[in-house]
Amino acid sequence: MTVPSNQDDANKNERTTYFNLPALDVSLAFPQATPASIFPPCTSDYYQFNDLLTPEEQAVRMRVRQSVEKEVAPIMAEYWEKAQFPFHIIPKLGALRIAGGTIKGYGCPGLSITGSAIATAELARVDASCSTFILVHSSLAMLTIALCGSEAQKQKYLPSLAELSTVACWALTEPDYGSDASALKTTATKVEGGWILDGQKRWIGNATFADVLIVFARNTATNQINGYIVKKNVPGLKATKIENKIGLRMVQNGDIILKQVFVPDEDRLPGVNSFQDTSKVLAVSRVMVAWQPIGISMGVFDMCHRYLKERKQFGAPLAAFQINQEKLVHMLGNVQAMILIGWRLCKLYETGKMTPGQASMGKAWITVKARETVALGRELLGGNGILSDFLVAKAFCDLEPIYTYEGTYDINSLVTGREITGFASFKPAALRQRSRL
């Protein structure tokens, strides 16, 4: 055995010190391009979509854009990497007056659905996790109370939720039931003065820190789906964070376990008496979800547009090369088409003409085009395309859960397919035939 010399120990200590140095700031390590902490100007509205917005909608867009570029962009890579939520920005998001979206009264902003969609996109343009946080809180939980709650429930819960002084989550999905959500197993049993909830939920955004949980359970007497308002820290309720996600890492998705959780009668949502009653909430939220990939794609294009003009190779900016210009134009064309589909969905909803199939096709098609767009952006940034410092890698990963939640591409396609053909094809033919026997 060789005994190490004092010189070997010195070399080892030198190596340890050398390798334990903190990473260089990206602006020093790679000074040729500006990182996304200084967010690029918006260059993705090529067809001047802003002209289609009302002055109020334009004001919402600029208010959200300026705030998230200032408050969220500098910290998003750090918190995304740590998979932690930046709780200190919640008051700043509350000050934007967008929580509650289209809800009128009760301290809510009463935005048009287009205005609410634009706010969603502007959040997602900078950071998809913050956009998802607001979407779960506002377009799912708050909207359920507004559309399905009693007057007393609206007055009790909506004002503080609109201010973001309290936070909500929406618990439908279960470990065994994602796309087949109507088959959920969580039960609600009537007892004197209220209900006892037993079951498990999974993938619930905001679950680990929500003050108010909207929980869906099967009424053991009627076998129908009912809705309940559950408060945090109630006995029998446990929420734990899902670890090891590759996308929306700042969002605190949780597993929820309900064991003999008592919910008083006053917190049962009177407007949820079957699974179909959730559809009026999901119709709005599906439109909002469709605007998330629009915003993500806008941000990726904006980042790539600036990066290619700053980054030089072979003696010229990357933007000067033909193949890069073709990819940029491909991305830009996708963004314009996605925006116009999303805008038309909003107009159909505002006039009462939007169908479930139209909402589903919009969400499915837009997420597919967004996937294509961010993949092109990833190519354009080369090696830096895998660094969250330059937004594209983070956006690439964040888009994956959005492609899946609120209905996968396939399920949304089948919803539209059922509407245009009259045939439901969700279950395999063999199972449908067996159920008729």
Image (cartoon, grey):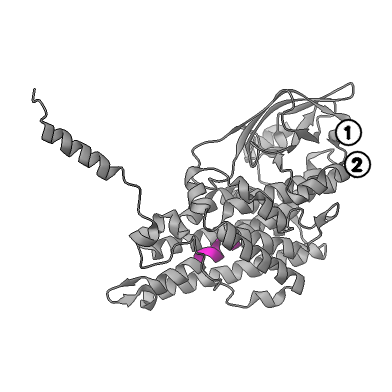
Q: Is residue 258 above or below residue 242?
A: above
Q: CA distance from mark 1 to mark 2?
A: 9 Å
Lower sequence index among marks 1 and 2: 2
Q: Provide the secondary structure element on which disc 1 rests.
A: helix
Q: Position of residue 272 (x, y in %)?
A: 83, 40
Residue position for label 1: 266
Residue at horizontal 28%, vertical 77%? 315
Nearest the viewer among 21 and 431 is 21
Tell whether label 2 touches label 1 (CB within 8 Å).
Answer: yes
Q: Residues within 10 Å of mark 2 (few under 14, many from 20)?
A: few
Q: Amino acid at mark 1?
A: Glu
Nearest the viewer among 350 and 362 is 350
Say if the magenta span includes residue 155.
Answer: no
The quarter of the rendered structure image containing the N terminus is top left
Q: Position of residue 6 (x, y in %)?
A: 12, 32
Part of the protein shown in magenta: 293-301
Nearest the viewer among 295 and 284 is 295
Q: Main secondary structure of the magenta part?
A: helix
Q: Is residue 16 above or below residue 289?
A: above
Residue position for label 2: 152
Image side of residue 355 versus residue 78, left or right: right
Image side of residue 292 versus residue 23, left or right: right
